[in-house]
Amino acid sequence: MLLTKSQIDQHNDALLQQHQRGLEYVSGNVPDAAAIINKLAAFQVAIPSWALGNGGTRFGRFAGKGEPSTLEQKLEDVGLLHQLNRSSGAISLHIPWDIPKNVSALKQLATQLDLKFDAMNSNTFQDQPDQQHSYKYGSLQHVDKAVRQQAIDHNIEVIKYGQELGSQSLTVWLADGSCFPGQLNFRGAFNNTLESLGEIYNALPDDWKVFVEYKAFEPNFYSTTVGDWGQSYLYASKLGAKAYTLVDLGHHLPNANIEQIVALLLNEKKLGGFHFNDSKYGDDDLTVGSIKPYQLFLIFKELVEGMDARGMDHTKDLGWMIDASHNVKDSLEDLLQSVEAINIAYAQALLVDNTKLLAAQQNNDVAQAQEILQDAYRTDVRPLVAEARLKAGAALDPIGLFRQLKVRDQLVKERGANTVATGL
Ligand code: AOS
Ligand code: ZN
Ligand code: ZN
Ligand code: ZN
């Protein structure tokens, strides 16, 4: 089910006048609207295969209708998002949920949909029916070398799938840790994990990166063996130049200053990528920008400033990914909202006058520094984001068009109402 160009054009024509009024207004108030629009148009955020269905909690799962049940259908969903916003040109796969059966057909489909394969994700937090050893007490940290080896081999297999598909990175998120004091020898768990990661690292192709994702808690509730950015940084720096820290916004203890973490990791050349999401209390499941949009802006401000200072390419030198999944909204509408929130924060960050900010900082002019940041944050950049979409051939109002064309109803017709997407 793909949209036609004329469906998009018709939708855009109807909104054009109103859009242009907004665009003129904001363009008159920002220094270089054209440059910002070009950057926005080039910026792509990868969609995780596991967010295309309504995720559950351990208490229950309320499946959505017309969810993708094959890998091909997952690609088609992302292709649809990409047609609507031209900002979702990549998919992140998860093995074994997304084992490709026919690699060349899958690659062909991806090319047709204009999608790239972003970071590959391994899974050693669940036991699969055919596996010999259980991960109940951890995987790469396990006290038994045989269990560790099984987890290492799995990660190496994931790299191989990724190589076939043209991915260039592996994200390792470990559920490893402990639920009770005394359960684990912290140093033993760290050293085992480091050694296991080292074997995976040695299997990485030269042009690949490995991202070590940290998480404060869940599913383990006393300790997590990659529990914070310091631990991830330790692993990444001991592993070598191809290893980086991955920041998932929802994986911190409450009130952590994520923008400062990001600034320092970038400074140390160890920031690898992002999992965007939002949360009110803890965890990682809500739509990006739905709870703390100012924090998201502050993070992007550090990203833009830090990447520019190091001459990095915004579009490809970090891995940009969404990682969220909840129970209540249409998954595709939810992802459109997340991508929009990311683009808005990025645009606001591009507005920050860093020369003026630096001068304010040099003069200890605290009020002025705050004014500069909030001036950017309070600018309504939505017309700039919409203009980037328009120029790229996407919809001025992606959710509006999704609803207008009753895309979900069509997916239900094609796939049925009783679908269960594999994944979380
Ligand atoms: C888990 O909390 C991590 O965020 C993972 O990155 C991700 O959600 C997982 O790999 C998907 O199962
Ligand atoms: Zn994540
Ligand atoms: Zn997470
Ligand atoms: Zn979660």
Image (cartoon, grey):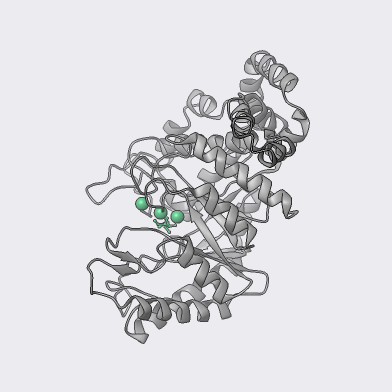
Question: In the image, what residue occupies the spot 46% across and 80% down?
Answer: 196
Q: Nearer the viewer, residue 367 or 274?
A: 367
Left or right of 261 in this view: 223: left
Residue 419 seen: yes
Q: Which residue, as the protein is rendered here, is positioned at the far bottom? A: 145
Q: Nearer the viewer, residue 99 or 226?
A: 226
Question: In the image, what residue occupies the spot 27% across and 63% down?
Answer: 222
Q: Nearer the viewer, residue 305 or 177?
A: 305
Question: In the image, what residue occupies the spot 22% across and 68% down?
Answer: 180
Q: Where on the picture, by quarter, is residue 244?
A: bottom right
Residue 298: x and y in percent read: 56, 40
Residue 100 seen: no
Q: Is residue 352 above or below residue 244?
A: above
Residue 190: x and y in percent read: 40, 76
Q: Which residue, as the protein is rendered here, is positioned at the far front? A: 363
Residue 395: x and y in percent read: 62, 29
Left or right of 179 in this view: 231: right
Callout count: 0
Q: Where on the picture, by quarter, is residue 352?
A: top right
Q: Is residue 384 above or below residue 28?
A: below
Question: In the image, what residue occupies the spot 59% across and 30% down?
Answer: 367
Q: Is residue 204 above or below residue 231?
A: below
Q: Where on the picture, by quarter, is residue 119?
A: bottom right
Q: Is residue 249 above or below residue 159?
A: above
Residue 22: x and y in percent read: 66, 17
Left or right of 36 in this view: 274: left
Q: Nearer the viewer, residue 119 or 249?
A: 249
